[in-house]
Amino acid sequence: MENYEAIAALAALAQPTRLETFRLLVTREPEGVPAGEIARLLAVPQNTMSAHLAVLARAGLVKGERRSRSIIFRADLSRLSELTLFLLEDCCGGRAETCAPLVADIATCCEAKAHVDD
């Protein structure tokens, strides 16, 4: 990932509605959410939500797929992974033991969520 791509992604997320939208879509992987439902769930007018989704799509963080008369949006988890790895690329100067707590926190978060869903 290039600097300008990371900056675009971070800028897209640096707005409360877009951050909420992205976080919602991450929780709804892999099925995605119709644009109208996203607007309803977040209590945002549909035309405003369209603009927010367009910003997230231009940043590569979400993808829309037309199904009949709806557009289903999904978080692009591979792009999220790229962004996270970009941010941590030089983590701790190559000393894995220094980054271990961060990696453990991420793994714990995912494991806790998996147990809640069971």
Image (cartoon, grey):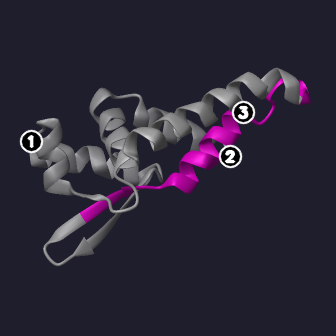
Decide: few, some or many residues near mark 2? Use Cα within 10 Å; few <14, some 14-19, many ≥20: few
Question: How many numbered badges does the structure rendering display?
Answer: 3
Nearer the N terminus, badge 3 or badge 2?
2
Residue 110 covered by magenta stretch: no
Q: Is residue 54 above or below residue 90?
A: below
Q: Secondary structure at mark 1?
A: loop
Decide: few, some or many residues near mark 1? Use Cα within 10 Å; few <14, some 14-19, many ≥20: few
Residue beneath label 1, please? 45
Q: Quadrant of residue 4?
A: top right
Residue beneath label 2, please? 2
Q: Nearer the viewer, mark 1 or mark 2?
A: 1
Residue beneath label 3, please? 88
Tell me the residue at 39%/55% (across/down). Answer: 29
Q: Are marks 1 and 3 in contact (CB under 8 Å)?
A: no
What amino acid does circle 1 point to?
Pro
- Give percent across and percent down for residue 54: 31, 52
Question: Label 1 vs label 2: CA separation?
Answer: 33 Å
- Give percent across and percent down for residue 87: 67, 33
State left or right for residue 77 relative to residue 41: right
Q: Which residues are magenta?
A: 72-95
Say the numbered circle drawn on residue 102.
Answer: none
- Give percent across and percent down for residue 62: 40, 54
Q: Nearer the viewer, residue 11 or 16?
A: 16
Question: Label 3 vs label 2: CA separation?
Answer: 14 Å
Q: Quadrant of residue 66?
A: bottom left
